[in-house]
Image (cartoon, coloured by chain):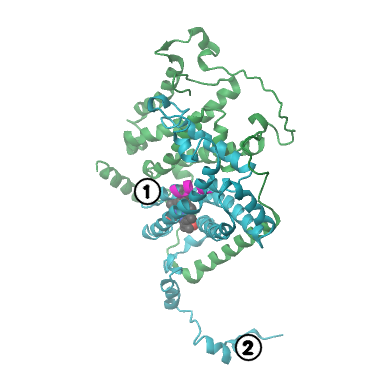
Chain colours: A cyan, B green
Amino acid sequence: MINLKDLKKTIFESQVWRSIFRHDYADTPRNRTLQVMSNVWMHLHPPKIRRHAIRVRFTWCMGGITFLLFLVLTVTGVVLMFYYRPVAEYAYADMKYLQFDVPFGMLMRNMHRWAAHGMVLTVWLHMFRVFMTGSYKSPREFNWVVGVLLLTLTLLLSFTGYLLPWDQLSIWAVTVGTNMARATPLLGHEGPFAQVVGVTPRYDARAFLLGGTIVGPPTLLRFYVLHCIFLPILASLLMIVHFWRIRKDGGISGPV
Amino acid sequence: MAEAPGRAAVAEKAKAAPFKAKIKPIEDKIHCWPYLVRSEFVCSVIIMVVLMVWSIYINAPMEEPANPTNTPNPSKAPWYFLGLQEMLVYFDPWMAGVVLPTLIIVGLMVIPFIDVNPKGNGYYTFEERKFAITMFLIGFLVLWTSLIVTGVFLRGPGWNLFWPWEVWDPHKVVALTNVDLPYWGPFKYLGNPKVFGVELVGLTAITIYFALGVAFWFWKSKTSPTLQELGPIRYGIVASLVLTMMGLPIKMFLRIAFNIKYIWVTPWFNI
Ligand code: HEM
């Protein structure tokens, strides 16, 4: 049997290893802190947290998983953007191209789709756990409000993305979804008090959203821009606030 | 500013009463590196593997090209919005599609400001916040989830109900026997009284419903410390949100049990 200790010694003390890494990582409290403090990415974390905060049983990891899925969506989304054109004549063909011709195109598309569904689920579960642990209570009131905005943005991101394949499923789902806008009180042409404001089918809340009276090419472009630029930037900004506030509010909540 | 002393008193009381945490507080702190970072890493790897395998085996749906002249029956919104689409059965679009979703979002946002109970902050407990948790479970688990499940699995052509094992029959005819409240049961003998075209039966019913909230305040606020802590404004918000939320199951019940369509018909909108 190979002696692991000896093997480790042979590798870590070899000339090659030593030429790359001058000295090894000493597991001291100071170094543990530095690992976090002097690394821009790790710096999201505080150096130390209360022990109960890392229990899966407490947070269900749901906020973290939501964030991970958001990152997956950003990466796969950028890949899809290389191939996809938000023009009614091309959009469907580009999807087919991704599906059949682009190397790993289908995998990218699938991952993007399933991660999006997953994110809706995990963000709901995250909200559920935050409610059940009462973590929205003082001093975390504001972070809960930011969270609700993030939840809304997550749904809007999912919804705007749903249109982009430009197939039967997407245009009709979006038609059903946006039809409600025509019933907006005051601002939709079929809503209560529409006559008072004088909105028409061509000039009301829904037409503003769709860029016309039906889900057509202008809608595709609008949803594309919202989906790929406006909503992700907004969500990222709010996530920055969300994470920053977790630290400023004294870390993950816990029994006093 | 007026509420500052109230807040302080609440906090004072919280300190006096011992918390009954299920998970006992652990005072010691641990380093994020390696303990937290390690579990984050393991968790990410697991999620990524599951997502990859899932994506390799299950393809995202893709149907025929978009065709504005061919409406599928049923046309369903994405699953996470089917709760809203399902509410369309019971309410008009301005209510189900605009007012109720707005109230859900606003209602969620105000939760931290209307829940003045200082207990149950940072640990799981049902005992110490029975009302808050019950309401949240009714709204989130019972109503929201069951509406989505109904919308995803039980709705077929014509938005009719089908069991999962039933064949979707696009020509299924369901008798439309719904009546509005003023024409139903005992109310039809009142002759549908109106003022300026506004039905009085529905107006009265809805006014009584929301007046219940006001009546409860006058009945209990003198004796209930919880209500005193809440104060009239917060109580008003809680009561309106709760009554509006419970309006959905009530309307569902009226529709399913008595075929009642609208409670209140006005020239501008119907409820
Ligand atoms: C894109 C969506 C979101 C992301 C990426 C996100 C991320 C996170 C992360 C990573 C945490 C750390 C603790 C944990 O993992 O549970 C957290 C905590 C928290 N989140 Fe979110 N979150 C999101 C949405 C929400 C929503 C929808 C709500 C509530 C409505 C919310 C409210 C909170 C609160 C109050 C905390 C502090 C919890 C505590 O101290 O115990 N977040 N979030």
Ligand 1 within 8 Å of disc 2? The answer is no
Amino acid beneath label 2: Asp
Alpha carbon distance from label 1 to label 2: 59 Å
Q: What span is in magenta?
A: A149-157
What chain does badge 1 belong to? B
Secondary structure, mark 2, is helix
Q: Chain of mark 2?
A: A
Amino acid type, label 1 = Ala
The answer to whether dots 1 and 2 both sit on one chain is no
**Looking at the picture, how far across and down is residue A20, in whole percent?**
53, 86
In the rendered image of this protein, does residue B182 appear above or below residue B86?
A: above
Residue B234 percent across, percent down from the top left: 35, 37
Badge count: 2
Residue A29 drawn in magenta: no
| Quarter of the rendering containing residue B197 | top left
- Residue A144 lies, in percent from the top left, at 42, 49
* Residue at the image point whose x is 50% and y is 62% from the top: A54
Q: Is residue B142 left or right of residue A198?
A: right
Residue in the picture at 60% in, 60% down: B47
**Which part of the image, by quadrant, shows the N terminus of chain B?**
top left
Residue B134 higher or lower than A9, as above or below: above
Q: Residues within 10 Å of mark 2 (few under 14, many from 20)?
A: few
Label of residue A28 in the image: none
Q: Horizontally, is B116 left or right of B96 in the view?
A: left
Q: Which mark is residue A6?
A: 2
Image location (x, y in percent) of residue B124: 49, 50
The reply to whether residue B160 is in sight is: no
Residue placed most toward the observer, B221 or A217: A217
Task: Identify the secondary structure beneath mark 1.
Answer: loop
Write down the residue under mark 1: B17
